[in-house]
Image (cartoon, coloured by chain):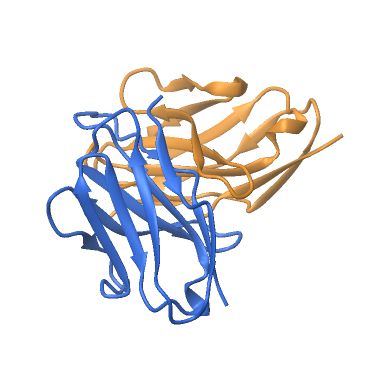
Amino acid sequence: AQSVTQLGSHVSVSEGALVLLRCNYSSSVPPYLFWYVQYPNQGLQLLLKYTTGATLVKGINGFEAEFKKSETSFHLTKPSAHMSDAAEYFCAVTISGNTPLVFGKGTRLSVIA
Amino acid sequence: GAVVSQHPSRVICKSGTSVKIECRSLDFQATTMFWYRQFPKQSLMLMATSNEGSKATYEQGVEKDKFLINHASLTLSTLTVTSAHPEDSSFYICSARPGGAGTGELFFGEGSRLTVL
């Protein structure tokens, strides 16, 4: 079975600073990896995904993530945080197009002015 | 991207009553939909996989008689919380994947916050 570990339930950064949200996964087969963002009382919006090919993937709102198989990681980064980035971020994994996503526990990002 | 609509967004009900939540894929057909439950400040827990035209597959620990799932068409799945109790209060989110999509990406509804008094 797959699993996801997100290190740090809460990350706080200053506006304009680098954002780094950590995600490590466990999967016995090549995974599909995702980052979603959730604003209060809303559903989830896809930020980016990795399936195959280029290991550095770019998403919306200036976010990107790099798949590192050797480290079983898929960390999310953004060079410069904006106040509007404050939200809950979830890393998720699946193993095919037919299986459900397994989510990490989420990381709440706070951006300080 | 694909759009999934969920209704109602908020519902308050009395203990012992039943509540139905609808999940619609607006611009694609979904043979499979997934229902998740989210407790405050926690992650999403998969409740069940809803399959069009057949019975839902429930995760371990989820009571199928309490959480009735019906997937009557390729664009609609419903979750009915029967005889609701305060401990059923939660945020319920549905998701769907366009048929044939091999990338595994799920599109999520806006979520439904259920409060049982």
Q: Position of residue B105 (x, y in %)?
A: 35, 34
Which corner quadrant of the image does residue B12 belong to?
bottom right
Residue that appears at 79% across and 25% down: A16
Residue A72 appears anywhere in the view: no
Vertical order, A42 against B17 (above or below): above
The residue closer to the viewer here, B79 or B51, is: B79
Residue that appears at 48% across and 36% down: A35
Q: Position of residue B19 (x, y in %)?
A: 41, 66
Q: Position of residue B80 (x, y in %)?
A: 34, 65
Count of numbered tags: 0
- The chain coloured orange is A
**Which quadrant is home to the C terminus of chain A?**
top right
**Which quadrant is home to the N terminus of chain A?**
bottom left
Which corner quadrant of the image does residue A13 belong to?
top right
Residue that appears at 43% across and 31% down: A68
Residue A95 appears anywhere in the view: yes
In the figure, is residue A47 to the left or right of B105?
Answer: right
Vertical order, A71 against B80 (above or below): above
- The chain coloured blue is B
